[in-house]
Image: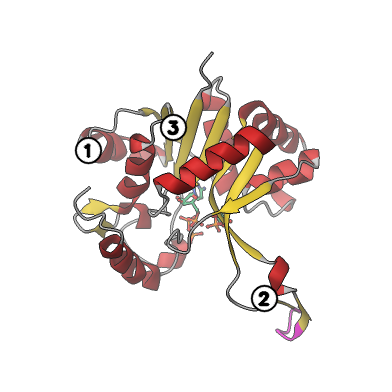
Amino acid sequence: MKEKHTAIVLAAGSGKRMHSQVQKQYMDLFGKPVLYYALRQFEECEFIDEVILVTKKDEIAYCREKIVEVYHLQKVKDIIEGGEERYLSVYNALKAAGACDYIYIHDGARPFVDQEMLQRLKEAVCTYGACVAAVPSKDTLKLADEALFAKETLKRSEVWNIQTPQVFAYPDILGAYEKMMQEDHTKMGITDDAMVLEKMEGQKVKLVEGSYYNIKITTPEDLDIAEIFVKKCNLQEN
Ligand SMILES: Nc1ccn([C@@H]2O[C@H](COP(=O)(O)OP(=O)(O)OP(=O)(O)O)[C@@H](O)[C@H]2O)c(=O)n1
Ligand SMILES: C[C@](O)(CO)[C@H](O)COP(=O)(O)O
């Protein structure tokens, strides 16, 4: 039987670090909202069957009317309410997704996921059961103490910047999230989904080549960079 691949696209954040009136996922990028770009990639991916879009409760109608309907995004099966934290938004979406084989969790604030990356992730998840997009760190990374003195320099050849999509066998990631929700999750400092599987199940997660274009729009200068990338990647016409 054909395997089912479902994507979760997250857009329920508050964008505090952007310091803007308009939520960053709805900001204009060449006439289209930032969020549209990632949704378009999942729409065009031939092996993605469905998309669950996660947003704030009072933005559901906007997403449906101004993004999903306007751009004819037929794979968006459901638009659901997120939670207070990113991982709580993911948990809501995992429950809403229903039975599938593989789940692709992606930040709506990362417009430059591309088809080749999705293909690499698909191949890896079918082999390893869990994988994330990643690129080697270009900077030297140090741990610092509370007074901001460097206390340790990480070995750069072993340091990777982790991106999304993060892709998992559905029962594994749902099980790991459910286990975490039974525990004191508020103190765990969960910043990505792979971490939930690592912590709860001790499962190994494979790093797959992401892209230096695959930035997360987080602070104001990222929007300037995103404009350059849209042109560079010829995405204006999509
Ligand atoms: N409760 C949350 C928090 C974040 N996100 C989503 O997760 C992605 C990555 O989060 P981040 O860049 O941190 O977005 P924000 O939380 O919006 O930003 P900030 O931390 O600056 O407030 C974004 O697409 C964001 O919309 C979400 O769905 N639900
Ligand atoms: C999941 C993530 O995009 C991987 O880099 C990142 O950890 C999300 O962090 P945020 O603070 O929620 O943006």
The residue sitting at 29% across, 57% down in the picture is 27
The residue sitting at 80% across, 42% down in the picture is 202
Apparent side of residue 14 relative to residue 235 in the rendered image (left or right)? right
**Kind of residue at disc 1:** Tyr
**Kind of residue at disc 3:** Ile
Q: Point out the tag, 2 or 3, that comes first from the N-terminus.
A: 3
Residue holding disc 1: 71
Q: Quadrant of residue 100?
A: top right
**Label 2 vs label 3: CA separation?**
35 Å
The residue sitting at 31% across, 46% down in the picture is 36
Numbered tag placed on residue 49 in the rendering: none
Apparent side of residue 7 relative to residue 154 in the rendered image (left or right)? left
- The answer to whether the residues at label 3 and label 1 have Cβ atoms under 8 Å apart is no
x, y percent for residue 207: 64, 51
Label 3, secondary structure: give it: strand
x, y percent for residue 228: 30, 68
Which of 148/9 is in front? 9
